[in-house]
Image (cartoon, helix red, strand yellow):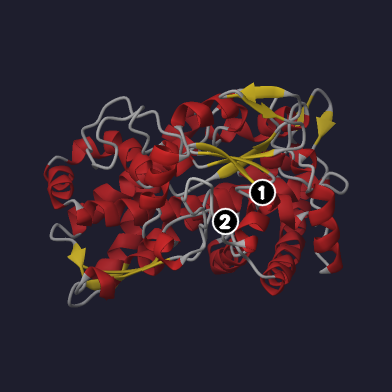
């Protein structure tokens, strides 16, 4: 199965750069996203880049690092820049290295997910699943998401005893996995297995080892076998779920191949799960660090849906992505050559003072927050509406159940950040309410 591109939220090229580690720029700014201090807080690094070197050539990236909002938005909106990793001049070299380690080519056959494809393949695949994420379809899910939030929080509240609980394990992770699993048509008894497969897949983002990538490959093979069994069942007995819809999907007579069905399901599982988990975790940390903003939302819960975009801007679950140059052009008088990579620091763009007033301040009343956290252009996150709905309902329920929400002990004791350089969020967050 095409594990590599099926699970990606960013490129193999970006992960390779993270593996290579330290790079000192001529300006003196160090771009090294794997350093320990950047796990807890990458924003001083982004601020330095914005102030001193927002558009610079990177040997390790095989191209350019972009941190300004306007530059990132321009690239994301320009179809001449490719999402296909095969457009990178170093892709053959990276593939040879991966092949020696037994990692399959994500572009072999029809295995790649829509995230790393360009039109017309991207257009065809996206159109086959987009109906499940229209405004009307997402709004129709509101009552069920509310029920799931209430069910999960009830268990947390009942089990917490003295009021202590761990947010990620007990709430932020179970909620989105149940939502996306139900959408796909996965029965409740298999939700834990889906969570395991998703956890393994995400480990390959950032500076993953070859052993971690091989473990993820085994997990994806298990997931592929599972999805194939469910798909066969739906071919014989269709139901009102997304896998049934994908099995039956046609556009101009063109069905999904079995590989495409698999890669699409994996994409929905991981993107619909991990990013929402980290949205909830990052939002809670931000609010606990800005108590006045937490109290405002707790006392005026109607503000919460409108605050989600500001929380996404303030600390994005997806920190970066990439595009590849396909034709000669210039940016800031610098020549862009075909085959170069552009590393787009989404989270840096979200703190660009040229775009946002007082960007390092969390302001849940900020209006018209057009952040970069869901991307822009052709690859704008398909599930953004669902993620925002889940995030809003999660915060509403959490603040209602635990009005005195706070860290359990000191922040240093209660909070541990994940080690992923691409998807940012706490891996442990001990709370009391």
Q: What element carries label 2?
A: loop
Mark 1–mark 2 contact, CB under 8 Å? yes
Q: What element carries label 1?
A: loop
Task: Tell me: 395 left or right of 259.
Answer: left
Q: Where is residue 349 in the image (x, y as percent from the top left)?
A: 43, 36
Q: Is residue 188 visible?
A: yes
Q: Position of residue 64 (x, y in %)?
A: 61, 39
Q: Quarter of the image containing the C terminus?
A: bottom left
Crowd around label 1: few <14 · some 14–19 · many ≥20 (10 Å): few
Sooner in the amino-acid sequence: mark 1 or mark 2? 2
Instruction: Tell me what residue is drawn at x 64 percent, y 61 percent.
Output: 20
Above or below, comparing residue 282 to residue 218 in the picture: above
Q: In which quarter of the image is residue 168?
A: bottom left
Marks 1 and 2, Cα distance to the nearest angstrom?
A: 8 Å
Crowd around label 2: few <14 · some 14–19 · many ≥20 (10 Å): some
**For this rendering, which residue is in front, 335 or 12?**
335
Q: Position of residue 138 (x, y in %)?
A: 46, 35
Instruction: Tell me what residue is drawn at x 79 percent, y 48 percent.
Output: 91
Instruction: Tell me what residue is drawn at x 63 percent, y 51 percent.
Output: 14
Task: Tell me: 334 left or right of 256.
Answer: left
Task: Tell me: 360 left or right of 418.
Answer: left
Above or below, comparing residue 318 to residue 374 in the picture: below
Q: Where is residue 405 in the image (x, y as percent from the top left)?
A: 18, 61
| Count of numbered tags | 2
**For this rendering, which residue is in front, 423 or 69?**
69
Q: Is residue 234 visible?
A: no
Numbered mark located on residue 23 in the image: 2
Numbered mark located on residue 59 in the image: 1
Above or below, comparing residue 292 to residue 203 in the picture: above
């Amino acid at each position: 199965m095409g594990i590599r591109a099926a699970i990606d939220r960013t490129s193999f090229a970006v992960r390779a750069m993270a593996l290579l580690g330290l790079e000192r720029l001529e300006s003196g700014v160090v771009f090294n996203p794997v350093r320990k201090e950047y796990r807890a807080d990458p924003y001083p690094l982004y601020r330095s880049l914005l102030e001193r070197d927002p558009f610079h050539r990177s040997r390790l990236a095989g191209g350019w690092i972009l941190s300004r909002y306007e530059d990132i938005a321009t690239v994301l909106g320009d179809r001449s820049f490719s999402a296909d990793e095969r457009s990178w001049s170093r892709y053959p070299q990276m593939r040879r290295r991966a092949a020696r380690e037994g990692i399959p080519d994500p572009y072999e056959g029809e295995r790649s997910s829509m995230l790393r494809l360009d039109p017309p393949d991207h257009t065809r695949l996206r159109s086959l699943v987009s109906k499940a994420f229209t405004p009307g379809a997402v709004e129709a899910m509101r009552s069920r998401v509310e029920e799931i939030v209430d069910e999960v929080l009830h268990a947390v509240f009942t089990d917490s005893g003295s009021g202590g609980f761990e947010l990620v394990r007990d709430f932020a992770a179970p909620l989105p996995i149940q939502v996306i699993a139900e959408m796909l048509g996965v029965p409740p008894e298999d939700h834990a297995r889906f969570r395991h497969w998703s956890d393994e897949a995400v480990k390959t983002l950032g500076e993953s080892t070859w052993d971690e990538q091989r473990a993820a490959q085994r997990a994806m093979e298990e997931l592929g076998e599972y999805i194939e069994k469910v798909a066969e069942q739906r071919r014989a007995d269709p139901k009102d779920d997304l896998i049934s819809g994908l099995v039956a999907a046609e556009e101009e007579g063109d069905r999904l191949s079995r590989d495409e069905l698999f890669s699409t399901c994996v994409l929905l599982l991981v993107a619909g799960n991990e990013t929402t988990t980290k949205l909830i975790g990052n939002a809670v940390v931000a609010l606990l660090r800005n108590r006045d903003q937490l109290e405002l939302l707790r006392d005026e819960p109607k503000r919460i849906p409108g605050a989600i975009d500001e929380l996404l801007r303030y600390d994005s679950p997806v920190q970066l992505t990439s595009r590849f140059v396909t034709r000669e052009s210039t940016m800031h008088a610098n020549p862009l050559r075909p085959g170069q990579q552009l590393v787009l620091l989404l989270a840096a763009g979200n703190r660009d003072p040229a775009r946002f007033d007082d960007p390092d301040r969390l302001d849940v009343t900020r209006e018209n927050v057009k952040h970069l956290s869901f991307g822009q252009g052709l690859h704008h996150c398909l599930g953004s509406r669902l993620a925002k709905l889940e995030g809003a309902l999660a915060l509403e329920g959490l603040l209602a159940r635990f009005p005195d929400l706070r860290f359990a002990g000191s922040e240093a004791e209660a909070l541990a950040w994940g080690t992923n350089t691409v998807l940012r969020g706490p891996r442990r967050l001990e709370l009391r309410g």
